[in-house]
Amino acid sequence: MNIGSSPFDETEEEDYYEQQQQHMSLDRSPSPRLSGGWSSPGLTTPHDGAANLSRGPSPSKRPNGTPRDVTWASAKAASARVNGYPSYTSQNQGFFSRHMRKVSEALPYFAHGGQEDRLREKEKLGRGRAGPGGSGRGLRVGDMARRVALLLNRRRRYAALLMLAIVGILLWFSTPIKYLYRRTSFLGGGSKFVIILGANQGGGVMEWKGAREWAIERDSVKNKKRYANEWGYELEIVDMATKKRYAHEWRESWEKVDVIRNSMRKYPNAEWFWWLDLNTFIMEPSYSLQSHIFSNLQATTYRDINLYNPLHIQHPPNGTSGDPNAPKFANYLDPIALSATGDSDPNSINLLVPQDCGGFNLGSFFVKRGEWTDRLLDVWWDPVFYEQKHMEWEHKEQDALEYIYTNQPWVRPHVAFVPQRKINAFPHGACGDDRGVPEGGCGGLDISGKEPKGGKEKECGVQGIHYQEKERDFLVNMAGCEWGRDCWGEMYNFRELSMKLNRNLWEKFKDWWDGEDEEDVKKKKEGEKKEGKKE
Amino acid sequence: MQFPYPRKTSQPPAYQPSRASTFQRRRTLRNLAPYIAGILTLILLFVYFLRPSTPTTTRAPPGTPPVVLVTTLDAKQSEHYKANIIENRKDYASRHGYSTFFPNTTDYDLMSGVPSSWSTVPAMRHALTLYPHTPWIFYLTSTALIMNPSQPLDLKVLDPRKLESLMIVDRPVVPPDSVIKTFSHLKGERIDFILTQDKEGLAGGSLLLRNGEWAKFFLDAWYDPLYRSYNFQKAEGHALEHIVQWHGTVLSKLALVPQRVLNGYTKEVAGSEEGRYQEGDFVANFHGCARDPKRNCEMEMKPLMVRWQELRDGEGRR
């Protein structure tokens, strides 16, 4: 034990000096050499080794039979030092040493530094007891572990082991555990969401797909798969190939309703079903649906269609022909159906659609399982409606939904709208040109219907349509790209942009190392954008 | 003898219960506290996450009538006739604590060229709005008379067990050959729509509708402008048959009951005896008298109207 000259408690000062002096005076025995033996000149003899060997089974003989240079004399001296009459006071006396000992006990290696040699000698002499010191000199892993173990009492040891095991398991299985947590309905709630991706649209017998179409499909599917895996959602990829079943029937390309219904049957415990067209790309996979929308439906959605009403749907409905001279009971509807916001309870929202410049957009929308949804899916397609309107309804089920929303008052209290940029942002070129955001951004997608930041000329608030990189919009829907735009080019650019925006620290560092500073990135991106536009 | 250890004494000390001192107890408590707290937190978390959603049932205010009778009155009919009909309904309603509602067929804004008979649908929707807590709506056409007012609808058909015994299952919705048949395993509690069938199809002259979200959906879907403009031959009657056959969410709420329970015909058009009104039946329906220009409802109804008045007055005298 090495007593340092560090400051210590004043009251014990005298004690300490006394002890120190005592120590000094008594500790005059020859000091041990590192190699063993003693430095006193007269005691070493040239015959040491032979004498040692000749004395039969030498206590210093190790099991492997290698004799060490320990002399009888030195052993005796050491022995006397340990077993004989204590020639010096225990080091354990006095406040300071006691406490230092306590402290130093916690440090496994240095704890018995002062006694190390003595113990080692002792063992060599064959009196080896299972001392706490062990025989090794220097730091050895096993040694240290044993010391730690000895320092702990049994219960603590078990607790520590358990903790270690738990931490180990958690680390080792961190990915599956995170996934499980996010999936479990009462924890992360991921299994309550089903993403339905309509793949292979118009494929099958109608049209051969080229390399670009396949590439679009591959990228889109991969993107959704990753997202679903990240958050523990269900992913249902449906083959929308024009089936023969529909080819000669009235219901041509109305499969969306059937597909949603099938998914509801397939995932009986899921709550929300998210329809996604193939030409969509999730730009920010780090947004969960819960945090993005569903944890706070009241604040992320709006019910009153008058806030943003590209179709000029009359609200409140009066269920009439729209004749202003309607008879006296024209408004025979209940107050909830007449209210612009239904019952204003977010739990009654069953359908969540974005509106683009031309009305509802079903490229990305949510339905909630429930009786209301069953009814809606049931009346969505009707032969009488179809017979009268199929020439007029260019967008088929989208127009039909708008029609039902307009004319059947039971629908409205359960429909809510999402600002389009929240789940269905368009690229530049769809629904007109990108109007950009004002200086300093929009500050969130305001749904209050107040004059948005930057006025009507910008992409803020409920009228925002186009994807804004600065605002990190969630999803891009390349709607209508198959008519005169380049689907694959857009998909590629957005994929690259998403990857760039979501680089991790290491990748950012690498890019920085490669000398690609912000300016370069910007230039490169703009170049890409221009290219994209050209295409 | 020498023993290495002191021997046990022959008189052991009196047994003392090993009661832990307060200090020890406190220490064990302190040691256990984190575990207990942890378990409690877990339980609370579970309770929090697994708690059932709060039911949002609104209690009906006292004095809510259990049934509302709805009859739409045609402006073309004579005042005397209308008064008789209203009297007939009110008599029945007052016996059982029901309410009545008599809108005119012209009250609602049907589109131009749409038969006025369509007004029955918004009239029912209107009744739902006026009586939001009333569980049932009873619609009876103005060409029908309540002949036997003694039994409340509850006993007659609304009680789930009674309804289950009356329900006609697995019957083509539109006789004789519709492939859509009424469901065979329906619970009385889950029925929202009760009506009868005559020889030609569903008889919409007398029907019961349970108030609720489904009723709103059903009436709004039925009243859709595209159905009104489609020129169904029998207007709302055919539209009803159409939605029942094409939409499962409607069919699954519908129960057919024998015709005479709700809707006995005085003159069977298709010549069946099954649905023919007999003395003592609940309702006598002069079906088709308003539609057919050769018939006159008031004249046809006169004998039974007199008979009903006789019965009522005789009852009062007794």
Image (cartoon, coloured by chain):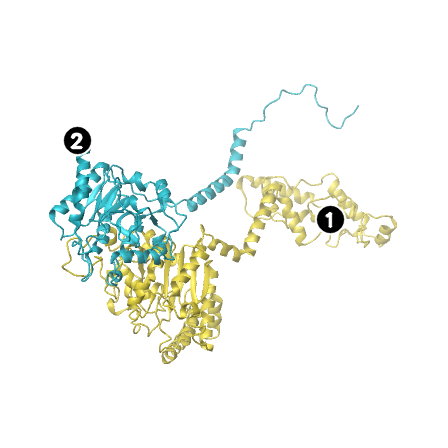
Quadrant of residue A353 within the rendered picture:
bottom left
Chain depicted in cyan: B
Looking at the picture, how far across and down is residue A271, in whole percent?
A: 41, 54
Disc 2 marks which residue? B317
Q: Colour of chain A?
A: yellow
Q: Label 1: few (<14), some or many (≥20) within 10 Å?
A: some
Q: Is residue A116 visible?
A: yes
The amino acid pointed to by label 2 is Arg
- Residue located 32% across and 52% down the image: A348
Q: Is residue B202 left or right of residue A326?
A: right
As drawn, which residue projects farthest toward the left? Answer: B79
Subunit bearing disc 1:
A
Please tell me in which quadrant of the rendered image residue A197 appears: bottom left
Residue at the disc numbered 1:
A120
Q: Quadrant of the C terminus of chain B?
A: top left
Q: Is residue A323 above or below residue B2?
A: below
Q: Residue at x 58, y 48 (%)?
A: A5
Residues at badges 1 and 2 in contact (C-beta under 8 Å)? no
Q: Amino acid at mark 1?
A: Arg
User: Position of A16 compared to B174: left or right?
Assistant: right
To the question of a shared chain for discs 1 and 2, the answer is no
Element type at mark 1: helix
Of the pair B147 and A302, the residue shown nearer to us? B147
